Image: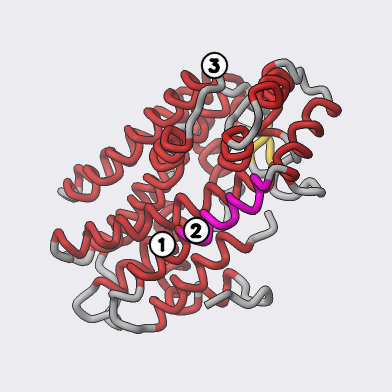
């Protein structure tokens, strides 16, 4: 079911509006510290939080996998959502240091405002808060799920760096990278949601696989932004400038002649931010059917995610998850 363009996140969030409000309060409390500098930075992080998609996946999945979908969620669901936010935020803070990035979602990054040393320590602090939150409440199952996601995220980043040096990424390698880098985190949200309500192993695995399919579709959508005509979501051509091989380009190269392939790879390797070379790659991908192919694959993963979602009982939360899936692949930024 395609989501109406007029549907907002607030409408999708309606079945869990109370949980989201409660979570925001609890998450703020979990970030408090007596160290003044650290407390100031934590306040800055909380203020610039994004759309809160991850907690939404946790709470909506918790409801559809609970024995009573209408019952209030247990405290474990809130702790699971906070754990994911803490560990994910830690990885983002560290990423900005590694990438020497001065901005994150339109705001100055931690390293831009407080320098690298403090940013690394802040990331370490967030990791430790997440670990302690779980250990203090014996949430070992939740900690295992999220720790596996962080491990996979790191492996995916390193695999992408390794492959970017030679630009020899195949579709199989691409899907392994995005499964680890992006899909593992969404999968951890849905698995944590199911686990927090005491669901059995089969249900948790079904919920995890559902999240993984959504995550892959989400990343392909993000890759498609690179070929837009406006700077929405991220600057057009940024992946090409950073020598990242994404699905539209990989598919287009697989159909190209040896000479054409060599020319395109030269432009990617030696673009040095030059607009003409980046634009030449974008035009090549568009003319070679790379965008249409990637859109088709994205919709295939969307449909596979919906097929898994429909195995759960119908409810307002299931409807919201359906809308949230479509929202993630039809978003314009």
Magenta segment range? 289-300
Q: What element does badge 3 sit on?
A: loop
Dot placed on the residue nearer the N-terminal end, 3 or 1: 1
- 73 or 306: nearer the viewer: 306
Disc sitting over residue 35 in the figure: none
**Disc 2 to disc 3: CB gap under 8 Å:** no
> Which residue does the image show at 53% across and 55% down from the upper left?
298
Q: Of residues 162 and 149, which is closer to you in this image?
A: 162
In the picture, which quadrant includes the C terminus?
bottom right
**Residue drawn at point x = 16 percent, y = 65 percent:** 198
Marks 3/1: CA distance? 36 Å
Q: Nearer the viewer, mark 2 or mark 3?
A: 3
* Contact? badges 3 and 1 (CB < 8 Å): no
Q: Residue at x 43, y 35 (%)?
A: 177
Q: Where residue 130 sits in the image (x, y, percent)?
A: 33, 41
Residue depicted at x 40% and y 42%: 179
Is residue 112 among what the camera can see?
A: no
Residue that sits furthest to the right in the current view: 276
Give the left or right position of residue 43, taking residue 16 as reference.
Answer: right
Rate crowding at label 2 as few (under 14), some (14 to 19) or many (20 or more) other CA atoms within 10 Å: some
Residue 184 visible, this orientation = yes
Q: In the rendered structure, does residue 201 fall within the stretch colored magenta?
A: no
Q: Badge 1: few (under 14), some or many (20 or more) residues near its Cα, within 10 Å?
A: many
- The x, y position of residue 312, in whole percent, is 29, 76
Residue behind mark 2: 53
Secondary-structure class at tag 2: helix
Is there CB contact under 8 Å for labels 1 and 2?
Answer: yes
Residue tagged 3: 166
The location of residue 61, given as percent across then percent down, is 34, 67
User: How many numbered marks does the figure carry?
Assistant: 3
| Left or right: 176 as drawn, with respect to 120 | left
Q: Which residue is mark 1?
A: 57
């Amino acid at each position: 079911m395609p989501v109406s363009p007029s549907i907002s996140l607030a409408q999708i969030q309606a079945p869990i509006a109370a949980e989201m409000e409660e979570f925001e309060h609890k998450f703020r409390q979990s970030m408090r510290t007596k160290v003044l500098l650290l407390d100031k930075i934590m306040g800055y992080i909380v203020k610039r939080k994004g759309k809160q998609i991850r907690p939404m996946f946790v709470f909506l999945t918790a409801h559809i996998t609970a024995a009573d979908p209408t019952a209030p969620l247990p405290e474990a669901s809130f702790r699971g959502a906070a754990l994911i936010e803490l560990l994910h935020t830690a990885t983002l803070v560290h990423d900005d240091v590694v990438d020497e990035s001065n901005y994150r979602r339109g705001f100055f990054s931690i390293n831009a405002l407080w320098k690298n040393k403090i940013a690394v320590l802040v990331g370490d602090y967030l990791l430790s808060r997440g670990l302690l939150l779980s250990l203090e409440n014996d949430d070992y199952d939740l900690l295992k799920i999220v720790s596996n996601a962080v491990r996979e995220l790191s492996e995916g980043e390193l695999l992408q760096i390794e492959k970017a040096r030679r630009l020899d990424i195949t579709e199989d390698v691409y899907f392994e990278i995005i499964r680890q880098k992006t899909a593992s985190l969404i999968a951890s949200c849905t698995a944590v949601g199911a686990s927090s309500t005491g669901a059995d192993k089969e249900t948790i695995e079904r919920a995890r696989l559902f999240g993984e399919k959504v995550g892959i579709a989400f990343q392909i959508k993000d890759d498609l932004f690179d070929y837009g005509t406006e700077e929405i979501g991220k600057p057009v051509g940024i992946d090409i400038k950073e020598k990242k091989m994404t699905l539209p380009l990989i598919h287009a190269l697989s159909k190209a002649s040896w000479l054409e392939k060599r020319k395109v790879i030269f432009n990617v390797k030696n673009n040095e931010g030059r607009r003409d070379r980046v634009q030449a790659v974008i035009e090549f991908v568009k003319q070679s059917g790379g965008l249409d192919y990637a859109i088709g694959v994205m919709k295939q993963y969307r449909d596979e995610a919906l097929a898994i979602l429909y195995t759960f009982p119908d409810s307002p939360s299931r409807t919201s998850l359906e809308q949230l899936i479509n929202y993630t692949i039809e978003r314009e930024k």
